[in-house]
Structure formats: C-alpha cells, structure tokens
Amino acid sequence: MGALEEAHLAAAVAAACACEEEDDDLELLGGEASPAAAAADAMEPAVRALLAGLGEDERREGLRRTPKRVAKAFRDGTRGYRLKVKDIVQGALFPEVGVDKRTGSAGGTGGQVVVRDIELFSYCESCLLPFSIQCHVGYVPSGGRVVGLSKLSRVSDVFAKRLQNPQRLANEVCGALHASIQPAGVAVALQCWHIPLPENLECKTLQGWIRTSHSSRSGVFEGENSTFWSDFLALLKLRGIDMEVDNHSAYIPWCPLRSHEVPLSNGHCKKSSTNGMVSAVTSMILSLGEDPLRKELLGTPQRYVQWLMKFRACNLDVKLNGFTLGNVSIYERPGGGMVDHGAIRSELHFPFCAQCEHHLLPFYGVVHIGYFDNGSGEGIDRSHFQALVHFYGCKLQVQERMTRQIAEAVYSISHNGVMVVVEANHICMISRGVEKIRSNTATIAVLGQFLTDPSAKAHFLQNVLDTAGPAV
C-alpha cells in the first residue's frame, strides 16, 4: 500500500471514529434511557434484518453502528408523538391591547400575525422517506393576547415529526393552534417536496422532486370572501409565494411509491424473498407507537422495502467500454511538463441518488468528471459515464468513497489524469439532529496529471462553474 493510499485509509478511519464519537456524545447528553430510547433499541434487530436482506454484512466497517444510528434517526424524526402542544403554548400567551377597534386592527385586537418560511421535515406515511416542508402560519389574535412567535414553528414541528401526509399535517397544525391559543382564526399553508424515484432525479436541486401545496384555515380565515385569507395570501406573495397558482398541485399524486401495487397487508402475504424485510419494517412502525394496520399505513412496509431494494448490494464487476479496476498505480504522480488543456474532456452534471450507509437515508446530487484524452482523439461516450455513476451510486454508500471509486474506474481507461467532483445533498444532515437546512457537501478526487498541474484543475473547475445553474 502506497503512502497516499495509507493516508486515504487513515482519513476514512478518523472520519468514522469522529462520527461515532459524535453519536456517543449525543447519547451521553440524553442521560438515562427513556421509554422512547427503549423503543428505538427494539428497532436495531429490525435494521439488521434489512441490511441482511440487502446483501450487506452488518459487521463491515461503516455498517457496524448503522442499526443504532437508524434507530436514533427514526426516534428523533418521530419525536412529535411524545410531545404535547399544551406544554409548548402554556405560559407563552402575552397581553397585547392594541388599538381601539373603531380606528383599525393591530396587536391583540384583530391584527394578523404571519410567520413565513418555517423549514420542516417529516416522514411520508406511505413510504417512510423524509419529505421537505416550507410552512407558513398566520393567526388573528383575540382577547388581547398574542403567542410567542417561536411557538408557531414549534407547534408545527410537533406534528411534522410524525408519520404524515401533507394535508393532514396542515389540518393538525391549524386545529392544534386554534384550540390552544383560541384566536379569532388560524391559517396554515404548506409547500412540500417528496424525493422522486432514483431514476427520475434530474439534478442537485429540488427540480424533479414531487411538489404539492396544501392549506388549512379556521375562524375568520374561512369562507370564499374572507378578507383575512386574502391578506394572508398577499403577505405570502411578498416572499414570492403564490399559493393560488400552486393550489392545483394538491391534486398531484403525492408519494411516487404509492402508485406501486403492494398487498394490503403488513408482513402476512404469500411467501416472498422480502417477507423478512417487510416484517422488520412493520416492527419498526410498531416501536414508534403507530398502528401498522391504520388505513394510511397499509402497504407502507412493502413500499419502504421496494425503495431499499433499489440500492441492493451488487457484486458484479464494471465492464463498460473497458472500465476496470486493474493494478495500475493510480496515485502515482507523473512528471512535470506542459499540459495541453485542449486534451481535457469534461463530462458534467450526471445525476445520482445513493443511500447513506450510516442512516439508510438518501443522498442525491450530481457528478462532474474531467479526464485527459489518451491521445486517440476519441472521447468516452457519455452513456458509459452515466452507467458508471449509476453503478457506484445505487447502493449503500458514503460520498467520499463513491467519489474515489468513480475516479479510479475512469483512470483505469484514461491513464493520463482524472478529476471527479461530486456535489450532494444529504437527507441525513437536514432531517435529523440539528437539521442543517440547505447544507450541501462537495467531494473531490484527483489522479494523474491533475495532481501536478494546478492550471488543469482550475480549467476543469471553471468548466463546471460555466455550466452550473443558479444555487438553490
């Protein structure tokens, strides 16, 4: 093993240890195990069964702590079942007299209060995959009382952190706020994005995601001619949000896996190679305190298993247009010399969707590949690169490893120099823990002539920049 290979291995081990230490630190902060933690522990055998069904070895490095991480992610992502709205709102109502009703409305006597752009994540009850939510909440105070603004987002999060569908989420948030703060009315508007099937992902942004808009209202917001509802929509438009235009999207089929035919029973259908996995998912739902026989959850275990099976371990070798992983010294630094930038070929924006092996949650984005022509004057067909990205992406992965594997495979046929950049959004980073909304991770692998020529690297990165769309 070369020095650079040893460095790569040491970095990977250090990253894995850091991730495990972070999980351990968070566990220590929690003190003694709660009933919820005990329920999460019951998930771990179920996750092991899922890994076995995917053809993975749970003992390999990277998967050893996956059952614990997945259980913890589900526990955090469904913490709303263990929270009560009255505990949040109690003590957060404040007197605010406002102006005389004869001269206008403000403060606690009829003035509308709207909190916009509340970023949330929830779990789709049809497939157990997280979906992204932008929530907008408005209310009209009554009785000379207003509620602390943060409570509107916290109450919204209570119901988001459950197995949900968008319309029920809007209804539950609206109903809970109306009952707890007793205003003149409540309005809730949601814009939701559901990850599509891997083969339908189009790029690194939310383009290609299934988007729907939903709303719920009570009190003075109800009725076709409600001026309060019109004012609410107008205040959203100030942020570029047009719920009237988006209203038709409520009729779009929400979960892409919902269209898949599945038996309407959870773990009790005829014998199948995935029956054990379906039973495992059913036990996970039970451990959350949910009823797997609830109408909306019938078929959910099968759909989740269908999603996971798209990332099943594959032991086939890549043999596409000469791509192999031979014994060439890919980390060897070539000698210096002038480099012809005209020989650099760029194949950019290959979409991919992989499954994080640490949390069994998707990460998705684009791959950019730059390589030096081997002198033949003929480049490698783009379809071969797409197949290569698909091969390394559609499995349990980590982004760092996927970047390196793609670079090594391309180098095995190019031999002169390869540079690979992967840009990805990780659901596990934005739907759990501190919820790093809008975070994006970039990784890079550099081999051959790109190692010694900074101008070649700059040339390739400029090509990526020149074809990039607007950041989202």
Image (cartoon, rainbow, N blue to C red):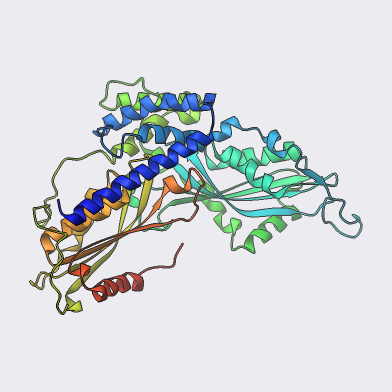
- The image shows residue 85 at horizontal and vertical percentages of 67, 35
The residue nearer to you, when weighing 378 against 413, is: 413
Residue found 36% across the figure and 52% down from its top: 364
Above or below 276: residue 434 = below
The residue nearer to you, when weighing 123 against 332, is: 332
- The image shows residue 250 at horizontal and vertical percentages of 53, 48
Residue found 42% across the figure and 32% down from its top: 300
Residue positioned most to the front: 3
Above or below 420: residue 126 = above
Above or below 97: residue 380 = below
Above or below 346: residue 329 = above
Q: How many marks?
A: 0
The residue nearer to you, when weighing 12 against 367, is: 12
Asked whether, in this view, residue 114 is left or right of residue 360, the answer is right
- The image shows residue 184 at horizontal and vertical percentages of 79, 45
**Looking at the rendering, which quadrant does residue 104 occupy?**
bottom right
Asked if residue 2 shows in the view, the reply is yes
- The image shows residue 156 at horizontal and vertical percentages of 62, 43
The residue nearer to you, when weighing 176 against 270, is: 176
Asked whether, in this view, residue 460 is left or right of residue 179, the answer is left
Asked whether, in this view, residue 342 is left or right of residue 167, the answer is left
Asked if residue 125 shows in the view, the reply is no
